[in-house]
Image (spheres, grey):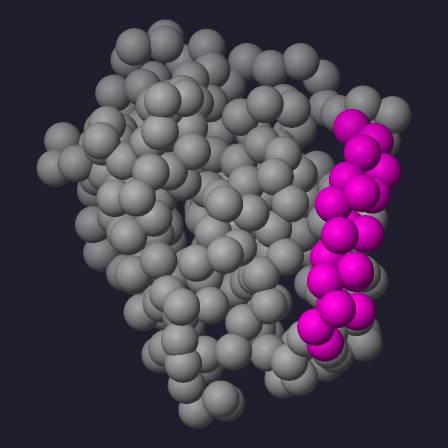
């Protein structure tokens, strides 16, 4: 399996990722890749569990109309816990944070009209795949089908909107499924190479130590969600990419 990660935003340091995969495979005897049969639509969690969260976004929009020509930030809890700080972290870029924690790519597809398309954004930044691979055992083929459907739907309505796909980040809590996530990241990077308006942002490599293992001081107590240091790295990585590509459109 070729997992070389060719990133269009943060090239280099791929060796750390490959090294970590080797270490994890050795520790787990490659068993992390032995999963149950592919998830069917019936196996996927019910996306309506997020209805109240989406309604809160809509109420916030009624209370304070969102800006036009903005960048929507959406995805699971790594975005959700950044919702309040992202506007300052990414200034002067105009952003609309719409992360909803615990989500998978299928959930984002379900609410795409309401958390993305409704804003007619100039760009969309997506963080999904962490819960797909790390908690819900959704095969990467299925995740990629959902991602490609999302891209198709966005560009069907907004053909010039740029899309930024964030890699899945490593974490201590999900080291057992990290090889799966690395494969997904490689697929994200390859997808971006095929689409002119899709850019892959590697937020994984900055969280790795010299020996390829994930840093241990960037998480809160659950060893999954980022702490302040983790978000400093996260925000700086994303900011560098978005400033490079989006400043001219501000």
Q: Residue at x 47, y 51 (%)?
A: 82
**50 or 191: which is nearer to us?**
50
Q: Residue at x 59, y 43 (%)?
A: 76
Q: Is residue 246 above or below residue 47?
A: below
Verify whether residue 58 appears in magenta: yes
**Residue 227 screen position, x and y as percent:** 33, 38
**Residue 212 lies in what quarter of the image?**
top left
**147 or 105: which is nearer to us?**
105
**Residue 220 screen position, x and y as percent:** 35, 29
105 sits left or right of 79 in the view? right
**Residue 161 lies in what quarter of the image?**
bottom right
Verify whether residue 88 appears in magenta: no
**Residue 159 screen position, x and y as percent:** 72, 80
Q: Is residue 175 above or below residue 31?
A: below
**Residue 119 lies in what quarter of the image?**
bottom right
Q: Residue at x 58, y 32 (%)?
A: 131
Q: Residue at x 75, y 25 (%)?
A: 39
**Direction left: furthest residue:** 210
Q: Write the start and end of the magenta stretch as one range.
A: 45-65
Q: Is residue 197 above or below residue 51?
A: below
**Direction front: furthest residue:** 63
Q: Main secondary structure of the magenta part?
A: helix
The reply to whether residue 169 is in sight is: yes
201 sits left or right of 61 in the view? left
166 sits left or right of 75 in the view? left
| Quarter in which the N terminus is drawn | top left
């Amino acid at each position: 399996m070729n997992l070389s990660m060719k990133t269009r935003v943060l090239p280099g340091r791929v060796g750390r990722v490959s090294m970590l995969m080797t270490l994890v495979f050795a520790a787990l005897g490659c068993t992390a890749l032995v999963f149950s049969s592919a998830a069917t639509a019936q196996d996927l969690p019910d996306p309506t569990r997020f209805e109240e969260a989406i309604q809160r976004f809509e109420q916030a929009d009624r209370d304070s109309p969102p800006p036009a020509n903005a960048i929507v930030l959406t995805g699971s809890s790594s975005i959700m816990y950044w919702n309040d700080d992202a506007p300052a972290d990414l200034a002067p870029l105009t952003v609309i944070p719409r992360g909803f924690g615990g989500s998978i790519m299928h959930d984002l597809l379900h609410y795409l009209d309401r958390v993305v398309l409704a804003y007619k954004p100039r760009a969309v930044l997506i963080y999904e795949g962490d819960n797909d691979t790390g908690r819900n055992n959704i095969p990467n083929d299925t995740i990629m089908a959902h991602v490609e459907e999302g891209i198709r739907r966005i560009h069907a309505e907004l053909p010039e909107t740029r899309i930024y796909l964030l890699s899945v980040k490593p974490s201590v809590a999900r080291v057992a499924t990290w090889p799966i996530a690395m494969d997904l990241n490689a697929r994200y990077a390859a997808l971006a190479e095929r689409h002119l308006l899709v850019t892959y942002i590697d937020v994984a490599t900055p969280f790795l130590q010299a020996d390829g293992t994930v840093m241990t001081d960037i998480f809160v107590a659950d060893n999954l969600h980022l702490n302040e240091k983790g978000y400093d790295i996260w925000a700086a990585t994303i900011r560098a990419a978005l400033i490079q590509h989006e400043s001219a459109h501000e």
